[in-house]
Amino acid sequence: MSELAIPELCLVVLIGPSGSGKSTFAANNFGTFETLSSDFFRGMVSNDMNDQGATKAAFESLNFVAGKRLDAGLLTVIDATSVQADARRQLVALAKAHDVLPVAIVLDVPLSVSLERNDSRTDRTLDHHIIKRQHEQLRRSLKGLGREGFRKIHTLESVEATEKASIRREPLLNDFRFDEGPFDVIGDVHGCLSELCTLLEKLGYRLTRDGQGRVLGAEHPQRRKAIFVGDLVDRGPDSPSVLRLVMGMVAQGNARAVPGNHEDKLVKALDGKKVQTSHGLAQTLAQLATEPEEFRLEVKNFCRGLVSHLVLDQGRLVVAHAGMIEAYQGRASARVRAFALYGDTTGETDEYGLPVRYAWANDYRGEAAVLYGHTPTLEAEWVNGTMCLDTGCVFGGKLTALRYPEREVVQVPAEKMWFPPAKPLTPAHAAKQSGSVPPGGGAAQDPGERTDGMLKMSDILGKQTIQTSIHGRVSIRQEQAAGALEVMSRWATDPRWMPYLPPTMSPVATSKLPDHLEHPAEAFESYNKVGVEAVICEEKHMGSRAVVLLTRNPVKFDALPGWRGTVYTRTGRPFFEQKTTDEFLSRIDAAVEEAGLWEELATDWILLDAELLPWSFKADDMIRGQYAAVGASATSGLDDAVVALEQALDSGADVAALLRRIRSRQENAAAYIAAYQNYTAPTIGPEGVQLAPFQVLASEGAVHSGRDHTWHLDLVDKLVKADPVLIRPTRHIVISTGSKDSTSAGVKWWQELTADGGEGMVVKPLKNLALRSGKSRGGKDLVQPGIKVRGREYLRMVYGPDYTDPHNLMRLKDRNLALKRSLALREYALGIEALDRLVAGEPLWRVHQAVFGVLALESDRVDPRL
Amino acid sequence: MSRTTQLLGGNLLVTITYTGPNASDLGYLLHKNPGKVQPFELNVGVATVFYPEVTAERCTAALLLEVDAIDLVRNKHIRMGTRDSLDHYINDRPYVSSSLMSVALGKVFSTAMSGRCNERPELAASPLELVIQLSSVPVMGAPGFATSLFEPLGWNVNEVPIPYDSKFPTWGDSSYVKITLTGTMLLNDALRQIYLLLPVMEDAKHYWVSDAEVGKLMRAGAGWLETHPQRAMIIQRYLAHQRNMTEKVAFHDEEDGSDTGDAAQLVPARKALRSLRLEAVLTALHELGTRRVVDMGCGEGALLQKLFSDPTFSSIVGTDVSPHMLNRAEERLRLRELSDRQRERVRLLQSSATYLDDRLRDYDAVVLMEVVEHIEPERLAALESSVFGYAKPKAVVVTTPNAEFNSLYPQLPSGSFRHPDHRFEWSRAEFDQWIVSIASTYGYRAERRSIGDADELLGAPTQMAIFKRA
């Protein structure tokens, strides 16, 4: 019994005439969906498996489906006769187009068998001459299959061999997903032996030397592995010794390597092919000339055996010399190899005679981190989850390694400029140095190519699914995204400086009390029901929600020196113009300094969730245009009505009941006016504004959603102490939801808070981010992060002056909170996700995607009174 | 505190006072007995007719409408909000009340409005001495707007604005006014005028405007609207600015039925400038040999329409951030009625100039007509990078106001912009500076032009730049 080895991911083309047993072979060896049969597709497009007229349509749809499967990385088998060269050519092209290997399995059974099987079929029979012709075509094909591009060809030459054969799937040569590291990925060495030895020792490797002092290998006491991104040779002082060291490490299992374009060329030169020896190859060949022949052979075999790129750590890490786009990762084809060696070249050359490369990393959106070299840059920097480790050691720069998974950069400087660079080194983020402020820079250095700071339409438009760490996948519908784009691009703060948007908050379940719409009892009860024992009640400030980003490190946010941060609303609009923002932030900075929070949090930036007061600072227009206008017109209309009704009553008309009703409305209108007047301070400038922070969202290296609320409020207290004029405290009380005494105290606290016009309170789980206890609900165990309980008088402004009339209140109690609650959870999860991504140093588009998601969900039509 | 919106029960009062012999005959004309208090259940609340004063010389009838706010919110047939709002819940205007009152008048006094009165036919056919009071009417317009509507009809008008809040005198007057009309008028004319002009003053309707409205307009306006000096504006507002309907009004004889909103009157000759701008852009595109073109920030599609009707342009893309604007453009181009082949020529895409968009790369030309001034200055670099650096068309055509010219608009307060959404307006020197920096950064050659009649000192109202990739 023979075992046919094929790559785990490939396009298998079964070749054999009708009746050779292809379908049976496929059914025995491959999964139901893996095999695409041309007969089946004929049936799908024409209702008739034998309709030869449908062949064209059948193959078009078969190719389409096969393409989708290969895109998804699934092995696919084509069950068609494929005895004609032209048919096979198309399938080979299909495999190449999806960067998988084409494999042929030939079922070469005797003609007699085919004919016999054909005759015994009941579903269809073919003319014998057709089957004969197919056999002849197969005969003619057999020899040339290798030249057609098939990377593996298995031929089964008898019925028995076909029946007994089995398939063994082998991992691709680039597949090292099982190897989870840790690794030290090392940039382009180019023969700089001394720097390499220094770097390896700095990384903690112990070098092994032979009697002549030659370095033969190195190993790490913690069994770390070095990974070389290629270009070990050329230009530098001692390429042979670098090769000896790396080959030694690889042989000992202490290193892996991918080939660089310089190794590729070296192999050709050693093969005796004619190659240009510029760019440093001449030096290497001269150095190798003094080595023994067997060493040169070893070098040739080593370099030739290197696989274009490596996929490591469960697919989370990809290493290739010139980088690797997502679509090519873990694939094998000539263009994948070319990309790995040379990058995305345009075919043009620049003014220095060097090839012009497309900056693929700027477009990179893949999940895997990609580490590469090839293009010398000034500093190793993350760009969309990729990092170029070639810092031009041979040109007098640095030799760079990245510790993975720690993501820590380790460098040694070049001992000298070993080789003059053809053009000056440029930073990966060219624009950071330029005077103008294009996002991510871009333009100044490399017009035409996007940079990390720029966002693409496709990052946010259309249906998006965002994986969150605390609430599973959150979907953004197309129309939600469409609704948010206008707000985001016309009004919101620059996305680089808006790493978070706060979620909406659900009101408490409707009160069962006859004269209340909202009451704390239901809030305590609902938390108690999901196992949250301790809650904190925080006063709801009569202000506007504000997010404050304060930084002493503008570079982190891709901003120019001197930039301090932003203060923006819940939809991302800046509160003040830039100058006022700067003044406001410098006052907050002083308070943070005074309170010692920079040191306590070990950070140079901080993101605060807060309320900005008074409300009329931002909402003056709305208070006047909406609330006051209603009050004015109601008062005027009612006063006129009362006069007319009193007159009618005097002249004997029966309007007493109507008059009573209108008078009670007059009282309601007065209460309503009193309610909004509460929120209105005399017009003040920004210097009179107060900030009431209630949560420290994030700072360097940490998202603080897991810290309990007393931790947050303690920090706030320090800020209040530092600047009591600017920073306003948040009154609060901790309540135990299981204790009747405690919840009664909570209700009393709320009543006192709202009796003198307070807006109400927010009830939150004391421990902050909370999951419901008990059995899991499939990753959706998140508990509401806060529930608002608004005051009875305050709600007049929301539901109208007359909402407390029993007839009105009864109808208003019929309100549906389900959508609001669900949005609150999803938006909260997206907000935390944005913070997680920010803190993890993920690319801007990933952070923005989550932030944009919050705004998109907010475009959902929800009863705005909730 | 978050933004809230609310709907409130309105209480509106209209009183009609007739002074004359046998004043109580007003009851016959209104078909409502002065001795009774009569409530009428309407689907928006309750309207009550009562008589505060009935004497031989004077008789006052009152119609009090109590709007039920909660019903209003839940009533699917009632549309609350400005005319752009698609959702009856989302409403920045708390009080859309006067059109409700108009409905109440039409229901309660329908016979009186027809002028029919079997008991007192001669009285119904004679002008009467009337005083009509309208309490708190919302008016979208400058002070004196209500007067300008009623005075030409022969009324003596007293229009008193209602202040926002006596506690905050700096807030000034609200948009609500109390109106007293005094005059000698046929009662049915008076009722029909109020019926029609209440929603016109507010410039918003609580229901979807359908074709039936055209008929209502013509019935209510018969005999007085034909000769009203403001009839074009009245018709537009009454029909909620829907052009296809205003065209159906038979006695609407102006040749220009286009949307001359109130804002348009602010800047004289603005319409002319608009078409000059379109011509200038088209000329530039022709000179550049453009065939495939993107109109970035296409708005309602004025330029797209021109491009579409010109066979030179083989592929036309209009983009805007606003789905609403794209819908308007789609309607304007009647895209849904086009054949597949015609449709292939034009595409509307939602897109923002501050994001990179793969769909817009490598066109012959990108037009930014009156777009850059709507972008925050700090975000402008993102637009530049996206258009010049990423989309990289062969040519870019930019138009933007010339700020210096603003002083020639007498109604424009000094230092303010031509449009409330403009984030900046450039002088000619500032524009030049921008052009030079863009051209050198991104490798374009630039040419500068002006649009509109130029002032010797201050230049032309609009400035234009044409960038060609070097």
Image (cartoon, coloured by chain):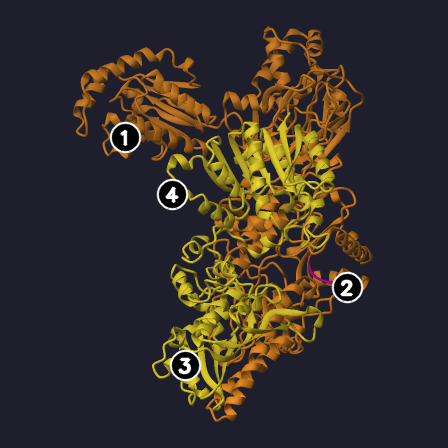
Chain colours: A orange, B yellow
How packed mark 1 is, by other alpha carbons closer than 10 Å (few <14, some 14-19, many 20 or more), is: many
Mark 2 vs mark 3, CA separation in Å: 65 Å
Say which of A67 and B289 sits in front: B289
In percent of width and height, residue A352 lies at 70, 18
Q: Which residue is mark 2?
A: A688
In percent of width and height, residue A268 lies at 59, 11
Say which of B12 and A384 sits in front: B12
**Chain ID, mark 3:** B
How packed mark 4 is, by other alpha carbons closer than 10 Å (few <14, some 14-19, many 20 or more), is: few
Residue type pointed to by label 3? Leu
Q: Which residue is mark 3?
A: B123
Name the element at disc 1: helix
Image quadrant assignment for residue A826: bottom right
Residue type pointed to by label 4? Glu
In the rendered image, the vertical position of residue B168 relative to residue B34, given as above or below: above
Mark 1 vs mark 2, CA separation in Å: 77 Å
Residue under disc 3 on the same chain as residue under disc 1: no
**Chain ID, mark 4:** B
In the rendered image, the vertical position of residue B90 relative to residue B391, given as above or below: below
**Along the polypeptide, which appears first: circle 1 or circle 2?**
1
Q: Which residue is mark 4?
A: B337
Name the element at disc 3: helix
Say left or right for A2 vs A24. right
Of badges 2 and 3, nearer the viewer stands: 3
Q: Which residue is mark 1?
A: A42
Residue type pointed to by label 1? Arg
Mark 4 vs mark 2, CA separation in Å: 58 Å
Range of residues picked out in magenta? A688-697
Name the element at disc 4: helix
Q: Is residue A694 magenta?
A: yes
Say which of A15 and B75 sits in front: B75
